Image (cartoon, coloured by chain):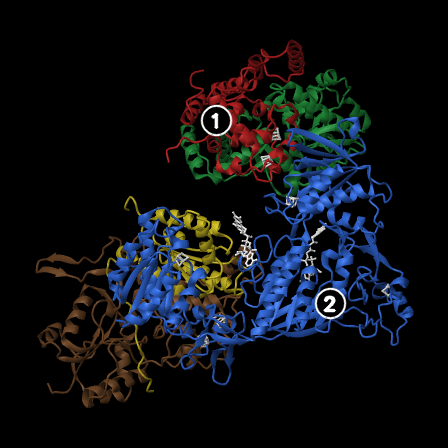
Amino acid sequence: MKKYALFPGCSLEKMAASYYRSSVETTKKFGVELQELEDWNCCGATTYSYIDELLANTLVARNLALAEKEGLDFVAPCSACYKNAYFTNKYIKEDPDLWEHINYALEQDDLQFHGSIEVYHIIDIFAKEIGPEEIKAKVTNPLNGLKVAPYYGCQIVRPRKNGEEFENPQFFEEIIDAMGAEPVDFAERLRCCGASLIMTNRQAALEMVRVLLNNALNSGADVIATACPLCQVNLECYQTAVNEEFGTDFKMPVLYFTQIMGLALGLPRKQLGIGSELVSAAPIFSQVMVKEGK
Amino acid sequence: MSAKPTFSHEISNLMYKSHGNPTKSCIQCGTCAGTCPVAEYMDQTPRRLIGMINANLKEEVLASNTYWFCASCYHCTVRCPSQIDIAGVMYAVKRYSIWNKSYSEDLVGPAFSEAFVKIIARSGRSYEPILAPTYMFSMEPKEFVQEAFNATKMMLKGRIPVLPTRIKHIKNFQEMIRRIIPIGGES
Amino acid sequence: MNEEKVGVYVCHCGTNIAKVVDVVDVATWAGEQPNVEVAREYKFMCSSLGQELIEQDIKEKGLTRVVVASCSPHMHEKTFRGACERAGLNPFLFEMANIREHDSWITDDKVAATQKAKSLTNAAIARVVHHQPLEPIPVEINPNTLIVGGGIAGITAALELADAGNHVYLVEREPSIGGHMAQLDKTFPTLDCSACILTPKMVDVGQHANITLLTWSEVEELDGYLGNFTATVRKKARYVNEEVCTGCGICIEKCPAKVLDEVFEVGMGTRKVIYRPFPQAVPKYPVIDKENCIYFLRGKCKACELFCPTEPNSIDFTQKDEILKLQVGNIILATGYDLFDVKRIPQYGYGRLKNVFTSLEFERMVNASGPTDGKIVLRDGKTPPASVAIVHCVGSRDENYHKYCSKICCMYSLKFAHLVHERIPDAEVYNCYIDMRTPGKGYEEFYHRLLEEGTNFIRGKVAEITDAPRIPAEEGKLVVQVEDTLIGRQRRVPVDMVILSPAMEAKPDSKEVSQLFKMGCDFDGFFTERHPKLDPVATMTEGIYIAGACQGPKDVPESVVQGAAAAARVAGLINRGTVMMEPVRANIDQDKCSGCRICNNMCPYNAIVFHEDRHVSEVITALCQGCGTCVAACPSGIITGAHFTNDQVFSEIEGILWDVRPEKVLA
Amino acid sequence: MSDKPKLAMYWSASCGGCEISVLNIHEHILTVDEVFDVAFFPCIADFKVHHVESYPDGYIDVCLWNGAVRNSEGEHMAHLLRQKSKFMVAYGSCAYEGCIPALSNLTSKEATFNTVYFDNPSIDNPNKVLPTESVQVTEGELTLPTFWNTVKSLDQVIDVDYYLPGCPPEPPQIWAVLQVIVGALLEGKPLPPKGSLVGHSGVAVCEECPLEKSEKTITKFFRPYEIVPEPGVCLLEQGIVCNGPATVGGCGALCPQVGMGCRGCYGPLPGVEDQGGKMLSAIASVIGAGEAGMDEHEIERQIEAVVDTIVDPAGTFYRFSMAHSLLERAKVNGKGE
Amino acid sequence: MSENFEPVIVGFLCNWCSYRAADLAGTARLKYAPNMRPIRVMCSGRVDPQFVLKALRNGADGVMIAGCHPGECHYVSGNIKALRRFVLLKKMLRQLGVEEERVQLVWASASEGIILAEKVDKMTAEVRALGPLNWNKTVLGGNGHPVVKAEPVAEEV
Ligand SMILES: Cc1cc2nc3c(=O)[nH]c(=O)nc-3n(C[C@H](O)[C@H](O)[C@H](O)COP(=O)(O)OP(=O)(O)OC[C@H]3O[C@@H](n4cnc5c(N)ncnc54)[C@H](O)[C@@H]3O)c2cc1C
Ligand SMILES: Cc1cc2nc3c(=O)[nH]c(=O)nc-3n(C[C@H](O)[C@H](O)[C@H](O)COP(=O)(O)OP(=O)(O)OC[C@H]3O[C@@H](n4cnc5c(N)ncnc54)[C@H](O)[C@@H]3O)c2cc1C
Ligand code: SF4
Ligand code: SF4
Ligand code: SF4
Ligand code: SF4
Ligand code: SF4
Ligand code: SF4
Ligand code: SF4
Ligand code: SF4
């Protein structure tokens, strides 16, 4: 069984507990164990960088060092956490001075960063480590006819610059396809949802959410699949606000892709944390025959 | 060379080399602003902000809301033909303004950031219920009602924790932070 | 100890050197070095007075060796060798120390620079005493010239040379010459019809007594050196006998098989399987596309043969590729360019959004003899667009793709705007550009004409093109999202058609071609000229010249200028008949060669032969180019590389390390 | 003693094969005996150092010095014999260029002692006893010479008149050289200039080697035990490292003829400063990997793969010439000593 | 190690590319470490490993060999020969205790003045960090011998 250190980040503790559960449950089906990183700390979201980039990097490095101590590769389901971890890992390795400085701080916590592990987003585990073929093979309940809008958002593809991946990625579509569902042509799938603005520039954030919901609806999606708790909260919880602001009538369910995957794998809804949505996902259950396991 | 560094140098110095080319290499093509999902709401487009930095218009840059409104989506960064990390520049300006306490008063971003950082320095983790009031005071009444409404709904669905969690060796953790910068110590 | 008398001259180069290097100190110090008879410093050594100084000392002080510490030998080695020669000293008894480019210009540290200047000067002194007098090697120039690539650049060069009475082999990969220019409709800025000005030249080439035209052919190997190259050319089977075919075209008419024409029509139209790329093709003989021919695929058809009116029949399914060996003295490469693959920028939607076109597709579309008979229409083949956006700088001026400006696309994008206005007067045209680059005679005037024609110019690089509407006005349209930087606002411009103006880039095989011809290409794949300003058509390899867009982005007038310039350079050499080459050559002491044969496959020019009877190797001087690879390889140390002998280099090492070398080795 | 020219031969850091080689010149040894008086030759006659000390300076006409200089005793003897001899001949590879003993220049004295006195499987030295340079016994002080960190060739210690290469030199070459010397001593014939390398063919071993040579492209190297060479074909071409091309001939190419690559004992060709460097250059030049047109890193990777099959380049290319090479020894632990 | 040690690096630069790259760096007034002292050779393929050894022996702290990128050699493939020799030489120098950073092979085409300057700066910093090599003093303890150039005697057998 392949094991990874799971970094839940602050949001997966409660706000996105369903993402946590569905991630653990679905990966288990593929013989992958996500073991929560012992004594992790908040990675600072983006906020730390506002104040001090070095501090932000140190906080992340502490988590990486913890995972290294366990000898496990690092997996984050939150895109922001992932981005922080990915880039800190990269920056430190590229900059010996930074490396030295950070290790000097980590010493205080009996830790050292060696740069020996890989950093993954949970979707990488499905897209690259497990792969669509294996997913297909394990799907017991193909979600035939379910139209899913794959929402990449920003940070699982950016600011990395590997070839076309950041402008024309396909891995999310491939995963949805492997579940037996149909990925819709979701043109705005890479556009920012504005999550980080909801507190600071509400007007902009709501417009950004509107654009996404509108495009998902036009593309015929039954549900939006996300791979980030911030996106999920933003797209889902602010639908009412968007409707009020723009006089629209969105009722678009927004689920974690792991939850949808869970359905395809025949896992019980409960185990996937389904039920805690603010926009009901009920319509999609009536639409696809979901054979639930126990 | 003892000449005082210009504002654009100061901003460049705030970024590690891994963050792409210096702002000076901007060709003012507007790809960033054409890409930016928030551009419409900013008082200066990202391109103009870069131009203003290069022109050392420090006061005007700091007074702008652009860098606080940047959603860190990095779309401009990956597209910039001069390989400038525009999102990184936005962070650099944020840091600069926080250190100099020179952001404009009516912005929520800085207060929110500081509150967030303090909580983490205290417990090692973030906690939404404490955070909420620190930014909500600045909202319009209508927004406040909605926000409270959302929070209550989430609380009911069990999606907001009742008590903050904290990490084990918090002392070590705080020592570690002190080795980087002295903030967080006083709270 | 050596008996040589060395003269050392340290140049100030105005202040270029003297500002950083203490030239007086260097000269005084040099005067104290062994073998140095006289050491001087002077303001400008390359000036006639500076040179006279050397000449005088040679004559009066009997100098036997000369060292000038100044700029790069690539700058003035020739100059000072000339001075030595005039004073009766063999020019190879001279050595240059580069204390400008390699020293005074790279540091502000005066102490370090002066120390380095002494090192480099001392190295030259130590080396020069081991120099030997050498004589340049005369090489005869074969008057035939090979030109590779039959675009406008190659055509021009071929005609210039041929008209001057020299024989030319013109090798073109495609079935017809003409290159990209043959695909264009009108050419900026005068808007004359491309075919009208190109066709007469193509016909001239086809009929010229001094030109052997080899289309559907490629150079596979190249041996030899300036004056005496041997090129191996593969003339691919056409399956049409050029001796008898009259070019009537009946076979083309009768051929039942049609395929998409991805070359000439860039996928916009079809052609027959036996075809001519375009009606005015030169030569006129068609060619059978073997991959798609029904007969070759299934063994049946032969309609072309059946209907061919010539006697004997021109169609010959048994034709084989021919291998030709051409003896030539000079070569001009004019292999042209390709367009950037716009799919590499997915946010522009090419391939996904069907009404996004490339510039070359548009050229074919507006061409009266093109696939839409010159009508500007959407992919459906009938609807004329009511609005068109033209996107500049696609893949150019972008560090993610090509950093350079492609130079021609602003102009042809303006041309496109004009053509849309002309054909669809009501259409809105938007040109989204970063900077409008129109330097050239009549080019800026052309831009002004477009301003007057009412084109909407948006100064901003397009961020993305999408078909996802955000507001009703965008529905069913392509939306071009761009910042209009002159007003500082993000705009979303809905249009029916988008034309991308991709970067001009080097041919995908330019690296291989440059290797084949033993010359360099730059990072972007464009061939490297000898000097970017003063020698833009020569290459680092003697006898190989370049012309046209293979050297860098260029429009037609510039390609023509380069084609003619390259021809002039070659004609000059042909006129001289013989040229003198540097005598930097390898030589094997055959008495001491053990015949181990280590060196035998070192030489890229096959200049080393092994004599089976005597069991020794020998360098054929005429073939050797003096790289010294074999010299370094010979384990017996008995190959001498003239002007770079072991003795000379060892002494140079000792000299350059004068301040750190162990005393004992000094001897 | 008679007034015949005086001959000496001394055995320093070496195996002693050189002594045997002198005796191995067959019937010519009788001529030697006829022509010379032996003044010092510990291997065949019982001379003591004090005998030499008692000679006047320049008493010995020809001294054949065999062996590298490895310790203080060798140094002392070298100076002594130099003083007493008219012609000092560095006889054989050890004296000329350090030979096998000088391979220890690739490591340090400590490491050498470790191997010799502790780590060797045939050693039983539980108390970790090392030779001591000075020991007090009841009879007084016993001393041993000081063992140096670096092995030197003879000319790195004293002035040498002639060099005779080979490990050991081959009989015909020895005889040829002796003839020249005898001719000079007895008939006043001219001698080669001082400092000459004598007793070799002047051309690399390959010339004498009868194996068939072709163009070389080598994609893998073998150690001698890994391959049975194809008879009649140049060994190097078969991937067996043969130093023949970089080694001056005169030996008659004995080794390659029996399937063993030339080890290089005759040393570099005249005019070559560094035999190892030259052989390295030759071998590397004909590695058949990394063709133009490949990716830079791929080329390097392929070359490295071939180079990996040359196990011990320094030991292979400097087997005999370490002491006399450009670098003379390795830098150990960040320094030399 | 002395505080302000400045390494001496001998550079063997190919006439066609890296020598011109160095010319270009100068013409462009790029400022870089003056520590590299260039020796012009016609091709990196002319660099005999003996040159490198000789330079190290004679007091250089480092040796840089610079040629055209593979595939761009003015003489087609001289640089590949240089690379082959370099790979083997590096392996041997490792045995001789010469740190890897001291002998470097770099590619710089005629247009890559910046790259050459950067490589020189980088190598200078690396060698500076290693400290002086000074083979004769530190390794041979000042006992280096003059290299003997022997002449053969006419063969008589
Ligand atoms: C859309 C567009 C519009 C343009 N409009 C204008 C305009 O209006 N006015 C203007 O002045 N310029 C215009 N240009 C530029 C113009 O096309 C070029 O300047 C010109 O064609 C360059 O000519 P060339 O001979 O150098 O290269 P090419 O035209 O590319 O010719 C090269 C020839 O070499 C052949 N070849 C290549 N490799 C080999 C090989 N290995 N062996 C044998 N043959 C080989 C090719 O098949 C080709 O025939 C335009 C370009 C584009 C893309
Ligand atoms: C400020 C400045 C900076 C520049 N910098 C650069 C640069 O950095 N790089 C670059 O590539 N280009 C540069 N240029 C451009 C460059 O100067 C020209 O491209 C180039 O000099 C043109 O050369 P020419 O021989 O055509 O003309 P000119 O240099 O003008 O030579 C014409 C000659 O003809 C003589 N002449 C004129 N009429 C007659 C007559 N009737 N009879 C006899 N003789 C006559 C003139 O006296 C003159 O000597 C620069 C130009 C300027 C103004
Ligand atoms: S995209 Fe880059 S180059 Fe263009 S305006 Fe923005 S920062 Fe400048
Ligand atoms: S990173 Fe900021 S500035 Fe750049 S596109 Fe996103 S929101 Fe706009
Ligand atoms: S010789 Fe060179 S360095 Fe001297 S003045 Fe002329 S250009 Fe300048
Ligand atoms: S044989 Fe081939 S080329 Fe001729 S008519 Fe038939 S398909 Fe066309
Ligand atoms: S010519 Fe114009 S369109 Fe083409 S790359 Fe240059 S600026 Fe861009
Ligand atoms: S120097 Fe040797 S390898 Fe180089 S071209 Fe001449 S013969 Fe060939
Ligand atoms: S490498 Fe030297 S010895 Fe061997 S064959 Fe060539 S020239 Fe002769
Ligand atoms: S076996 Fe050795 S000595 Fe004989 S030819 Fe080959 S390399 Fe030369």
Question: Would residue A40 be seen by someone viewing this image from the given angle?
Answer: no
Q: Residues within 10 Å of mark 2 (few under 14, many from 20)?
A: many
Question: Would residue B124 be seen by someone viewing this image from the given angle?
Answer: yes
Residue E117 in the figure: left or right of residue B87: left
Give the distance between the C-alpha atoms of the residues marked 2 and 1, in whole angstroms. 70 Å
Q: Which residue bears the numbered disc 1?
A: A52
Look at 35% across and 49% down and name the residue there: C19
Q: Amino acid at mark 1?
A: Asp
| Chain letter, yellow in picture | E
Quick one: D174 or C395, which is closer to the camera?
Answer: C395
Q: Which quadrant of the figure contains the C terminus of chain B?
A: top left
Q: Residues within 10 Å of mark 1 (few under 14, many from 20)?
A: many
| Chain letter, red in picture | B
View quadrant of ligand 1: bottom right
| Chain letter, blue in picture | C
Q: Dividing the picture into quarters, in which one does residue A30 lie?
A: top right
In the figure, A120 relative to D333: above or below?
A: above
Chain designation of label 2: C
Which shade of the palette goes to chain D? brown
Picture coordinates of residue B51 (x, y %)?
56, 31
Which shade of the palette goes to chain A? green
Quick one: C49 or E154, which is closer to the camera?
Answer: C49
Q: Dividing the picture into quarters, in which one does residue C216 lie?
A: bottom right
Q: Amino acid at mark 2?
A: Val
Quick one: C21 or C572, which is closer to the camera?
Answer: C572
Look at 64% across and 16% down and name the residue there: B158
Picture coordinates of residue C644 (x, y %)?
41, 68
